[in-house]
Image: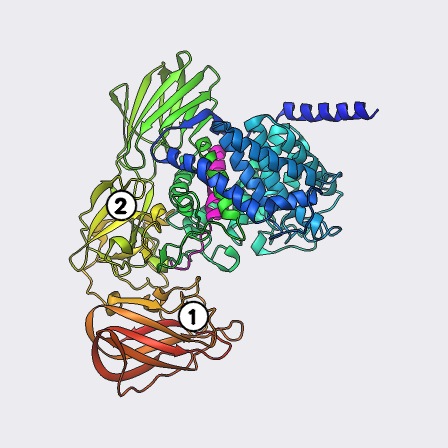
Amino acid sequence: MKRACLWLFLMTMVAAVAARADEPAHRKLKAVPFTAVQVRDTFWAPRLQVNREISLPHNFKWCEDTGRFDNFAKAGGLMAGEFEGIYFNDSDVYKVLEGASYSLADHPDPTLERMTDEVIAKIAAAQRSDGYLNTYYTLKEPGNEWTNCGVMHELYCAGHLFEAAVAHFRATQKRTLLDVAIRFADYIDNRFGPGKAVDVPGHEEIELALVKLFEVTGQQRYLDLAQFFLQARGNPAQRKQLYGVYCQDHQPVAEQAEIVGHAVRAMYLYAGVADVAAYTGDEKFVATMNRLWDDVVLHKMYITGGIGARHEGEAFGDRYELPNDSAYCETCAAIGLALWAHRLNLLHADAHYADILERVIYNGVLAGIGMDGQHYFYVNPLAADGNHHRQPFYPCACCPTNAVRFLPSLPGYVYATSSDGIYVNLYVAGDGSAQLKDAPVSISQVTEYPWDGQVKLTVSPAAPCTFDLHLRIPSWCTQAALAVNGAPTPCQPNGKGYAVLRREWKAGDVVDLQLPLDVRRTEAHPLVTADAGRVALERGPLVYCFEAVDNGGQVRQIMLERDPQFTLQWQADLLGGITVIHARARGDRQVTAVPYYAWDHRAAGPMAVWVRQDGRPRAPQPDQPDQAGWEGRLYRPLEPQTLGPSLPLELSDLLIPSASHCWTRDSVQALVDGREPQHSGDQSLPRFTWWDHQGTTEWVQYELAQPMTVRGTAVYWFDDEPVGQCRIPATWRLFYRAGDTWREVAHASGFGVAKDTFNRTTFEPVTTDALRMEVQLQPGFSAGILEWKIE
């Protein structure tokens, strides 16, 4: 009887997997899977190799060294011991396994496969007989399962298990991890749903993962459960306790109109909404996606594709709140935006979403991954003082493990198919194969993109057939050119951003696409006050930045000439081979910019994406600025004819701030940003603080770009009483540099520590190249400054 039951169970599992789901009826495109695309270029292929040969072993080792693997062995009774780490550490193991599975599908590796199998065996051992699987609760809080879904990430970890299981099964056809996932998914489905427990995860992820499990098994119950979680979110009619804005649980998903809360959670949620809508055709969900997408890309997205402006809550800020120094821009959030953009491209067959996908992967995602494959950014600011660096791992390791699974999936974003054609969304050298209704089609690309805009595509159907070839024309490209088998062809994008070539295709047909890669000066919407008077440089899909190592040790004082006279230089031995941009700046300077993704790989020093532009006022625009020409845009190319008169250099342009210490979420550049505080507790402005130093003696100073005579100073103290720990200082003094010596200013009066005002101090004039403020913090408190002027 037991054997019969076991046989029946196994056959049920096989049938479940064999069934598989039909293609989503409401999705206009089908992605060509990453297993059908081979990347052979000089840009992405080396990065995929580094991910495979260095990053995966690196992440495996960190998971082993930090006890993440051992937690499963302990929970499964394979070894003794207590739970180690953070309560959601299981998810990191699943993400590493997902990345390993993608890699195995493309590059079989017996060593990696053995490592993967060993970890999966520990995971299977840790699963309870009823299907439940979470090592934190098994080891540390048995009996408290599901008592805190809003905080404790049980469903989040389950989602990453499901994703890893699907990836592993598709890559290897092994069922071990998939069977574990199916048992846990069935357990969750038996617990949650209509007539059962009604709750939602505080950290979204399981929604999109359940759809993947539905796709590989054909089990409708998983799609229904994903839909249940979405419909219960923010729904007071179903749940008495909502988890609030932070978790996008403040109102029903179908009614949400503004993107808010934790950025990563939002991206995973809306990726799941897009997946469910693709199968159900839920018009309210689709309308929600459209509204929220517009809110992100028109109001809350950095030029790099980064999202999440605030450190507090790792969250979106208000509309147009896009500070540079204090930008959070978590790497995971950029990956999440790429996932969402890809799904919306498939849903709508619109190149706009692929444009954002491209922006994100070349800038927001890639910057988070060190070129050595062993260091990562968690936070990706657009300006830095020289103290922000990639790390080999983090106690909260979501970003390294997310990166290691995302990169090998990249080939799956290159092509898509419809009922009558092939879509080319990314330009990456290599080979791909797509199945159309009339015949399989091979397609290859030869290109040096993103350094060169010439793309040669060879289209080879198994037999001559007629279909549409859709070529994405990036929104930044205004003069694309096309030729088919050497004959020029009109290149006019359709309303969806694709140039469409319809013809009878034969094996060996060649399409030549030219995308001119001119340097673009880009300006931000006038309501983005952080970028007032500034421009960023872009070329093709790449955003550039200025590093101190290339620009005489400082970048904040750069002001581009009205005609910067851009020149390009290919440097094969620099940062893996890059094209650098040289430009003319005020002060008869030549300045150099490198791709943003490549910053912080050389000598430490300041970095800036946005720099001053001569002819653009520095001060933010009035409360009601002229927004003509900005409809539907957050960023646009600068039109030189719109530049105003040449600007005189301001004193603040000559000041280079530094400090004994600066809290990672603050910036010394706030001292010279020219923004006037409303009061000492003004949280709307960038600030400088010495937090978390308390009761110590600290300093902050200005290096002067050239010696000058100084006779006074004014400082506006930051004080966040009663909620924070920054107070006005106990006392302070002022010094100037004479040669190699710091001397205290003479005959001084002032040294005020009043709140809500500028504290002005005058002294005997001195000619110097540096000014230093020495500050004694109050016992038990830190201090900060909102603005510091010198006269």
Q: How is the image coloured?
A: rainbow
Amino acid type indicated by mark 2: Arg
Q: Which one is nearer the viewer's eye here, 430 or 480? A: 430
Residue plotted at (66% across, 49% down): 136
Q: Pointer 1: what residue?
A: 690
Residue that protrudes farthest toward the front in the picture: 79
- Quadrant position of the C terminus in the picture: bottom left
Q: Nearer the viewer, residue 264 or 505?
A: 264
| Above or below for 748 versus 226 | below
Magenta segment's dominant SS is helix
User: Residue flagged by tag 1: what amino acid is it?
Assistant: Trp
Residue 486 occupies quadrant: top left
Q: Residue lying furthest top in this view? A: 463
Q: Which residues fall within the magenta stretch?
A: 325-348
The question of residue 335 being in magenta is answered with: yes
Mark 2–mark 1 Cα distance, whole angstroms, equals 38 Å
Is residue 331 covered in magenta? yes
Count of number-bearing discs: 2
Of tags 2 and 1, the one toward the viewer is: 1
The image's mark for residue 752 is none
Quadrant (top left/top right/bottom left/bottom right) for the N terminus: top right
Q: Residues within 10 Å of mark 2 (few under 14, many from 20)?
A: some
Secondary-structure class at tag 1? loop
Could you say which disc has been placed on residue 520 in the image? 2
- Quadrant hosting residue 494: top left
Residue 224 at least partly seen: no
